[in-house]
Image (spheres, rainbow, N blue to C red):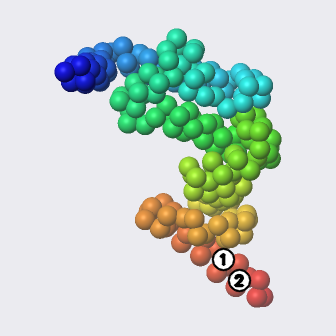
């Protein structure tokens, strides 16, 4: 009898715990936006270099919530865990730094709070599909190909080794690939003379 009453109490507790996420949607969205602000603010300070990577516990402390509650709330609202949100923001910032600066991958890794650049490279490759150096090269190549379409014809050779990364379904990329092939045929003819 006691066991069945305890089980009944626990079932009600679980039901009420789950129901709070449904009935408090406006409050939850406010907490979600505050969470995003905390994560963005973390990377705009020097905390990554001094403290390291942000954790769910750090964000929960800033929002005056428990880490488990914050994780459950974000998972119910977005379908992704709080740690996944932090990691996605980290990858977005890493992409900006890789393309926007000439810093080495190690410098970027240390700036973002990683103790070891190899760990940063592993996390980046897991999320993006390319290592940071490959990502820099591929996107540099795309920029050069776009410049080719605009009339700057002299620097196309830098892109040839990255051709495998282009999406052939994209019409603009197909057009730029055709431009590159025409230019390379012209250059082959002119170098033969």
In the rendered view, tell whether residue 127 sits above or below residue 151: above
Residue 143 visible in the picture: no
Q: Nearer the viewer, residue 47 or 137?
A: 47
Residue corresponding to mark 1 = 184
Mark 1 crowdedness (10 Å alpha carbons): few <14, some 14-19, many ≥20: some
Tell me the element at label 2.
Answer: helix
x%, y% of residue 152? Answer: 68, 59
**Image vertical order of residue 149 relative to residue 119, above or below:** below
Q: Residue furthest top?
A: 64
Along the line of sight, which residue is nearer the eye, 188 or 75?
A: 75
The structure residue drawn at horizontal position 63% and vertical position 28%, both measured from the top left corner, is 54
Of 37 and 169, which appears nearest the observer? 37
On the question of residue 72 being in view, the answer is: yes
The residue shown at (67%, 32%) is: 53
Q: Quadrant of residue 192?
A: bottom right
Q: Looking at the picture, how far across and down is residue 3, in whole percent?
A: 25, 24
* Quarter of the N terminus within the rendering: top left
* Res. 162 mark: none
Residue lying at 57% horizontally and 56% vertically, measured from the top left: 129
Residue 39, x across and y down, in percent: 58, 25
Q: Are marks 2 and 1 in contact (CB under 8 Å)?
A: yes
Please give left or right for residue 68 compared with residue 62 in the image.
left
Residue under circle 2?
Answer: 188
Q: Position of residue 127 (x, y in %)?
A: 56, 49
């Amino acid at each position: 009898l006691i066991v069945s009453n305890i089980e009944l109490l626990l079932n009600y507790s679980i039901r009420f715990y789950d129901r709070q996420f449904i009935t408090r949607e406006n409050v939850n969205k406010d907490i979600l936006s505050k969470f995003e602000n905390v994560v963005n603010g973390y990377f705009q300070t020097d905390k990554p270099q001094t403290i390291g990577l942000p954790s769910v516990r750090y964000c929960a402390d800033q929002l005056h919530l428990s880490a488990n509650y914050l994780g459950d709330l974000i998972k119910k609202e977005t379908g992704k865990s709080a740690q996944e949100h932090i990691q996605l923001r980290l990858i977005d910032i890493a992409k900006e730094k890789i393309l926007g600066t000439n810093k080495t991958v190690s410098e970027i890794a240390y700036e973002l709070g990683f103790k070891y650049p190899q760990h940063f490279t592993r996390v980046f490759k897991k999320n993006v599909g390319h290592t940071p150096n490959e990502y820099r090269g591929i996107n540099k190549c795309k920029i050069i190909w776009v410049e080719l379409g605009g009339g700057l014809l002299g620097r196309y050779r830098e892109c040839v080794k990255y051709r495998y990364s282009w999406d052939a379904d994209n019409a603009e990329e197909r057009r730029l690939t055709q431009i590159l092939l025409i230019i390379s045929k012209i250059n082959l003819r002119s170098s033969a003379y």
